[in-house]
Image: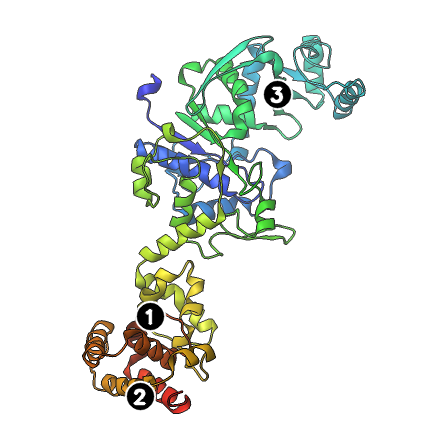
Amino acid sequence: MSKEIRRVRVRFAPSPTGPLHMGGVRTALYNYLFARHNGGDFIIRIEDTDSNRYVPGAEAYIFEALKWCGIHADEGVEEGGPHAPYRQSQRKEIYLEYALRLVESGNAYYAFDSSDALNALRQEKESCGETFSYNYSVREQLDTSLRLPPEEVARRIERGDQWVIRFKMPENEEVHMNDLIRGEVTVNTSTLDDKVLYKSADSLPTYHLANIVDDHLMEISHVIRGEEWLPSLPLHYLLYRAFGWSDTQPQFAHLPLLLKPTGHGKLSKRDGDKMGFPVFPLQWTSPEGEVSHGYREEGYFPEAFINMLALLGWNPGTEQEIFDMDELIGLFSLERVGKSGARFTPEKTKWFNAQYMHRRDNRELGKAFLPILREHGVECSLEKAALIAGFIKSRATFVSDFWDLSSFLFIAPTSFEEKTVVKYWKGENPSHIAALRELLAGIDDFTNTNTEAICHEWIVANGFSMGQIMNSFRLAVVGASKGFGMYEVCEVLGKEETLRRLDYALATLPQGM
């Protein structure tokens, strides 16, 4: 079957060696968007063959993080599917079979070198100012099946000697590859070493073998992964050829790096620790108790986080910046993914969250606000919390900002901002506020639109200064020159509380200065 008409099948294949970095989330997102855009399948496969680096809790973290981000698999460890199991440690019997096929075809060989022997060779080369490379120039002089008689190889395996299977990298061959983002890439095999594919010590394959075998068996059509895997591409091309799978090998796309906010280099956890922003989708506590901040716990909406990540490396070709997931799916293409690194900007991420805050349903925000109110000893109905959220969300970046923006609604002023008193509580303003108090007392419908219409008409009819009245009104009710629209404030407080506050101000503040 030709590549052009193959069903699109992509996979995200993280290793449970730690929490999922935001760069990993972006890789998962681009795979997900590509699959959905093309009506294909998105698969999650856990690549846990590196048992020495396995971190307890990392796999569960990966699944929880992807769910929070709204990235859902069609097949995977949790979903199952026709190519199960999707955890590599449960597939290890498969890999030995394929490793042995490569040995039988002459594309791989057994190596019995001990760690001590290899370290000695490295030190010897270093003493001469050279670098040791396990490749075509040394493999037939070392402890390998390329030098040993077949019966000796069999005897060593039979008695339980430890061995690895290494790929036999061709000598001085140009490997021509195509990357969907970077175009044509050519590498000479003489610059490459003979990678280990399988280890008898733990009966597990290395990443290179397991990755190729699983992608083939799971019918993966496109491999979309980070730029750091680009140096492995020649080996992967040659493995497909060695197995006889070149006609069905996937197309490759290597994504640009996420760059730190300032300076040079890849974004890392240390940058977040130093500059005070998260680099993980969720908070992570290491087995040693070290805590790393997460976007969820910092108050970011998953949609804002995803929107920000989508634009770190991909360009929609328009000035539009706010996209929901369906819009991203509809527009996404690898052709618009850039080659150069994408610089992460923490402040821009906050901007994205603010945009989603402004668009959020008031009732949903009200629900999120209620626990914060309870932390401050305030019991409030959902209806009132939602009403407040609707009035202040345009001023907030996070729901955690709501208390600072609205605490005056729950705590009546007992003192008044001195500079505002001096500026606005003077002349005839106190008497005007007393008259306004009586006007408000006669209003039954205390919704902000009705109250505003009546008060505005009264101010204009009496020829009062709108600024003087409204600022004096705010001082009396709020205690300072802060807060959102005064008629909205009055609607939240209600008629009784508004009048009570006005009475307190009129009784407490001097009547004219």
The residue at the point 54 percent across, 19 percent down is 235
Q: CA distance from mark 2 to mark 3?
A: 88 Å
Residue at the spot of label 3: 195
Residue type, numbered disc 2 = Ser
Answer few, some or many: residues within 10 Å of disc 3's Cα (few below 14, many 20 plus, some between 14 and 19).
Answer: many
Residue 19 position within the rendered picture, expressed as x and y whole percent measured from the top left: 55, 45
Residue type, numbered disc 3 = Lys
- The residue tagged with tag 3: helix, strand or loop? loop
Residue at the spot of label 2: 431
- The residue tagged with tag 2: helix, strand or loop? helix
Q: Are marks 2 and 3 in contact (CB under 8 Å)?
A: no
Left or right: 243 as drawn, with respect to 127? left
Residue at the spot of label 1: 382
Which label lies toward us, 2 or 3?
A: 2
Closer-to-camera residue (316/442): 442
Which label lies toward us, 3 or 1?
A: 1
Q: Which numbered disc flags the more N-terminal residue, 3 or 1?
A: 3
The residue at the point 31 percent across, 64 percent down is 363
Q: Which numbered disc flags the more N-terminal residue, 1 or 2?
A: 1
The part of the image, by quadrant, that contains residue 101 is top right
**Image quarter in which the N terminus is found:** top left
Residue 418 sits above or below residue 30 on the image:
below
Closer-to-camera residue (27/442): 442
- The residue tagged with tag 1: helix, strand or loop? helix
Residue 40 position within the rendered picture, expressed as x and y whole percent measured from the top left: 33, 31
Q: CA distance from mark 3 to mark 1?
A: 61 Å
